[in-house]
Image (cartoon, rainbow, N blue to C red):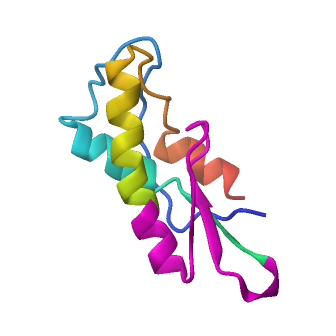
């Protein structure tokens, strides 16, 4: 089961590339990373990391820190490609939604 390293988030709509709660793509990416899920792989093979809603974005690392670092790098490219292709960006859960889902 994937788990959340920390809790936070902002509202974003998939249909548009503007979010009133986010001043930049850097803030959007930071909020997305806070919604990351980590999973320890069997047989001490490291960790997998992903962000719900970001289809096809999954990375691996020997440690949790390495997996999150890989995810940060991959997310930047994922966001850039999505915007270039005009797909928009996935909605992020609000702080309140994350607090409820963590119960």
Q: Which residues are magenta?
A: 42-70
Q: Left of 74 or right of it: where is 27?
A: left
> How far across and down, in percent of the image, does residue 57 sit?
56, 46
| Quadrant in the rendering for residue 78 | top left
Q: Left of 65 or right of it: where is 49?
A: right
Q: Nearer the viewer, residue 96 or 67?
A: 67
Callout count: 0
Q: Left of 79 or right of it: where is 20?
A: left
Task: State the quadrant of the N terminus.
Answer: bottom right
- Outermost residue to the left: 23
Is 52 within the magenta?
yes
Task: State the quadrant of the C terminus.
Answer: bottom right
Is 67 within the magenta?
yes
102 vs 82: above or below: below
Residue beneath the point at 71% across and 82% down = 45
> How far across and down, in percent of the image, does residue 97 sit?
58, 42
> How far across and down, in percent of the image, does residue 65 sit?
46, 78
């Amino acid at each position: 089961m994937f788990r959340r390293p920390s809790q936070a988030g902002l509202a974003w709509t998939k249909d548009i590339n503007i979010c009133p709660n986010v001043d930049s793509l850097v803030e959007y990416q930071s909020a997305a990373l806070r919604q990351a899920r980590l999973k320890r792989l069997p047989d001490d093979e490291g960790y997998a990391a992903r962000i719900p809603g970001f289809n096809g974005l999954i990375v691996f690392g020997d440690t949790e820190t390495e997996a999150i670092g890989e995810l940060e790098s991959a997310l930047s490219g994922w966001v850039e490609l999505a915007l270039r292709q005009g797909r928009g960006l996935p909605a992020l859960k609000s702080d309140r939604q994350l607090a409820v889902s963590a119960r």
